[in-house]
Image (cartoon, helix red, strand yellow):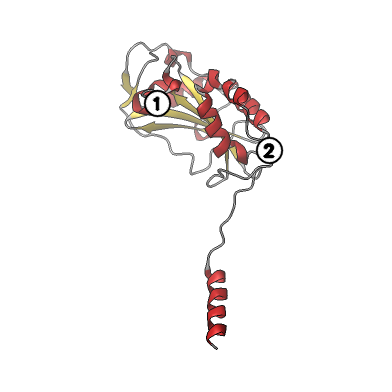
Amino acid sequence: MGRFIAAALVLLTSFARPAVAEDVAGEFDYWVLALSWQPSWCAREGEGSDQCERPAGWTLHGLWPQYDRGWPSNCRTPHMAPTRSMTADMTDIMGSSGLAWHQWRKHGTCSGLTAGDYFALSRIAYEQVERPALLRQLKTAVTLPASVIEGAFLEENPTLSADGLTITCKSGRIAEARICLSRKMEPIQCGPDVRRDCDLTDALFEPIQ
């Protein structure tokens, strides 16, 4: 009887544990293109990083597969990891090969694409967005409403809408511009968990050094 009870408890326990859903490569709803304002990142946490060795403005943080709510990450993929030359080729828009590798591992694996195709699509997404030239010409640090940055992007990119663009802040600084794109790379409205605009009216915006 003791053995039967023990076996029954093991069986019941196995059913009681919640199933862990595994993210599946290629199964997502839309893309989020994340652009970082490099001076903010370097001032905040980039001391000694090779990403800060040369001046840059809006750099590619990543191209992220997104669900309508939430996002997949670190998916199993049948595709090989990128070569060193692949990640090195992304440094002109990402700042470092290490960031390119990290983005592949966390987000690219969920795209359903090969590493080469994922990086190629990331470059296409980055290059189709006009980064406001006026912001890159700033000579001194200023404080401003985050909505000013959003307005500058909307003015330069008339196909974007306010609901398809989010400006984020971190540690009181303008951090990123996040743009939502369909799987066909067309601007769309962001999901509610992405559409969380920074509401600071005095966010620090530092110039390219």
Mark 1 secondary-structure assignment: helix
Q: Quadrant of the N terminus?
A: bottom right
Residue at the spot of label 2:
79
Assess whether mark 2 and mark 1 are in contact (beta carbons under 8 angstroms). no
Which residue corresponds to the image point at 65% horizontal and 25% vertical from the top-left?
A: 120
Which element type, helix, strand or loop, lies under badge 2? Answer: loop
Q: Residues within 10 Å of mark 2 (few under 14, many from 20)?
A: few
Q: Hey, which residue is sitting farthest front in the picture?
A: 3
Residue at figure coordinates x 60%, y 27% from the top left: 122
Frontmost of labels 1 and 2 is: 2
Q: Which mark is residue 94?
A: none
- Please determine whether, in this image, residue 135 is positioned above or below residue 7: above
Compare marks 1 and 2 and give the one earlier in the sequence.
1
Task: Answer whether residue 76 is visible to the viewer in this image.
Answer: yes
Q: Position of residue 131 (x, y in %)?
A: 51, 19
Q: Taking 19 as reference, is 117 left or right?
A: right
Image location of residue 89, percent across then percent down: 59, 20
Q: Which amino acid is tagged 1?
A: Trp
Total count of labels: 2
Q: Which residue is mark 1?
A: 41
| Residue at the image position 48 percent from the left and 17 percent from the top | 132
Image spot of residue 35 (x, y percent)? 49, 27
Please tell me whether residue 1 is drawn above or below residue 128 in the rendered image: below
Picture coordinates of residue 20, whole percent (x, y): 56, 58
Tag 2: amino acid: His
